[in-house]
Amino acid sequence: MAARIHIWAPAFRPFGGGISAFSRELALSLTGLGYRLSLFGRDDVGQLWRSFRLRGAGALPAPLQKIGFAVQLLVFAVKERPGMIISTHVNFAPVALLARLLTGARYVVVAHGIDLHPGLGFLRKLALRRADAVWAVSRWTRDRSLSLGVPGHAVTVLANTVDDHRFDIGGPEHALRVQHGLQPGDKVLLTVARLDPAERYKGYDTVIRALPALCRDLGAVRYLLVGTGADQARMEALAGQLGVTDCVRFCGFVDDEDLAAYYRLADVFVMPSKGEGFGIVFLESMACGTPVVGGDQDGTRDALVDGALGRLVDPDDADALAVELGALLRGQGPAQWFRPRELRDACLAVHGREAFSRRVSAALAEFGATA
């Protein structure tokens, strides 16, 4: 019987995007490929997900969760002797390095983007450089790995995927239009992001700066911001300064099961980021048949296949963004982007679960793992 694989993640609980979404999709892919898994999510509390019992430290008091999770990982590594450990966050990499010293288990670190930076602590940098492999979710993230001293031969690009069952094409979202005061003929832009000062790189303020020109050219343009955070007050003030308060809708937190409806409601999804490791939200939008605009300086390029699947723009140029958004809102661009089923199919051909499983299988073969 093949050795077990451990996946260590921030969480597997069945909601939330980013690293948790990647971790869930990786577990599903490995299960489909026939591997035996044990799943450890720091914020999980022992609940069931699919057929897995999630082990984690979420039930511990907050000050004890970090050390409690590390101890749990080491105890089970010694007990189960996995043949491979996959740490989906660099924060767990030092524990994986120690587990290798104790058990001989080889380990992979998944790199996402801004988690890799020059200020990364010594132990995390050391564990990253000593990893048997680093799986970077984009070319941009690969370059950040190399800049921290990871050997080039150890880095493989493993692009993200999307839950193509939850994000799909649907009918008109009449209830949402009423909820947000949208009138017939309104053009709708959407961003899904945490409104956090640490995540201003996502560019939602640039979209607000583009609104005056858009509204002059197109009339009623409405910008829906899904997400919460301490940066909302700054965005409200910016909208007021620019005279577009009536154009911006702060939608707050939206449950995962309702998120697809927002993508389907929008005419264009826009997130002109300049620090995004990949951007699963772009895939979610395209899987719902909605065209996308992203920044041209980060991992968004991989999500949009260098502009084949969506428009890439300078994330610092609000005027250029207004021009590109105006063109898309008028239906100007590749015909495929405005045909929901074709856009979805094109996205899934590159980023769907089947394509992701092929990439995972290739990365494992390169690593030398077998089911």
Image (cartoon, helix red, strand yellow):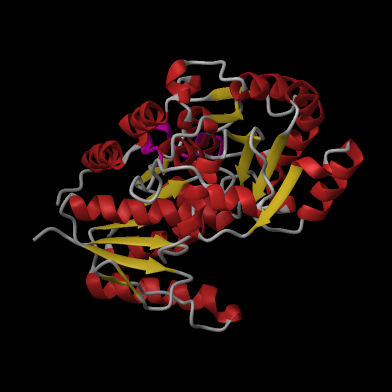
Residue 164's spot in the image, x, y percent? 35, 45
Rendering quarter of residue 364: top left
Q: Is residue 18 visible?
A: no
Horizontal side of 178 relative to 60 (left or right) equals right
Q: Residue at the location (67% across, 22% down)?
A: 326
- In the rendered view, would you say 52 is above or below 156? below
Could you say where residue 344 lies in the image, as x and y percent from the top left? 38, 33
Which image quarter is the N terminus in?
Answer: bottom left
Q: Would residue 346 be counted in the magenta stretch?
A: no
Q: Where, by quadrant of the figure, is residue 6 drawn?
A: bottom left
The single residue placed furthest to the front in the displayed view is 184
Q: Is residue 274 left or right of residue 109?
A: right
Which residue is at the far left?
A: 1
Front position in the image: 158 or 181? 181
The residue segment tinted magenta is: 146-160
Compared to 205, does 40 lie above or below? below
Residue 370 locus on image (x, y percent): 15, 48
Q: Is residue 68 left or right of residue 297?
A: left
- On whether residue 155 falls in the magenta region, the answer is yes
User: Residue 360's image quarter?
Assistant: top left
> Looking at the picture, how far across and down is residue 126, in whole percent?
50, 51
- The structure residue drawn at horizontal position 25% and vertical position 39%, both measured from the top left corner, is 354
Q: Residue at x 39, y 55 (%)?
A: 23
Total marks in image: 0
User: Which of the pair 246/110 is nearer the observer?
Assistant: 246
Closest to the observer: 266 or 184? Answer: 184
* Residue 29 seen from this side: yes
Say if 178 sits above or below 146 in the image. below
Say above or below: 37 vs 300. below
Residue at 33%, 49% in the rendered image = 165
